[in-house]
Amino acid sequence: MIVITGQIFTDQETLPALYSRLKSLCEPSRAEDGCIFYHMAMEDEANGTIMAMEGWRDQAALEKHLSLPSIAKLLADFDGKFRNDVTIHEVSSSQKMAV
């Protein structure tokens, strides 16, 4: 499993539109083959920080998601308006925690 965690930083002017677009991608992304979870949350509105968490079955599923027109359009529409601090983790079945 591929797990992506991170923060997206933007300015106060861009924040509402960017957050809205990111949230609008959640449901369609969750419906994609290979998506395990996909969440966006407002972490710190005053500082323009959005939290992102995604889980994908494998690298192929993530790459297919990233190649979608909706992702390309988001990146083009907000080009230069945000920066990411994202970490990608690969989790094997032996790394999963039993609860």
Image (tube, helix red, strand yellow):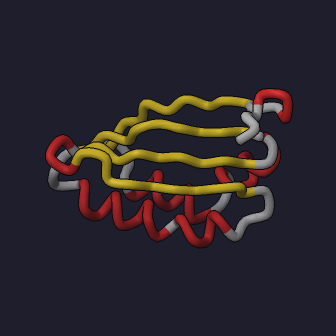
45 up-or-down from 17: above or below:
above
Picture residue at 41% right of the left edge, 65% below the top: 21
Picture residue at 72% right of the left edge, 39% below the top: 2
**In the figure, is residue 92 to the left or right of 40?**
right
Residue sticking out furthest to the right: 93
Question: Residue 62 at what x, y percent from top left?
Answer: 72, 47
Picture residue at 23% right of the left edge, 55% below the top: 14
**In the figure, is residue 36 to the left or right of 58?**
left
Quarter of the picture containing the C terminus is top right
Q: Which of 88 and 96 is in front in this view?
A: 96
Question: Residue 25 at what x, y percent from top left?
Answer: 52, 66
32 up-or-down from 63: above or below:
below
Question: Residue 85 at what x, y percent from top left?
Answer: 43, 30
Question: Residue 39 at what x, y percent from top left?
Answer: 51, 56
**In the figure, is residue 77 to the left or right of 98?**
left
**In the figure, is residue 95 to the left or right of 24?**
right
Picture residue at 20% right of the left edge, 45% below the top: 11
Quarter of the picture containing the N terminus is top right
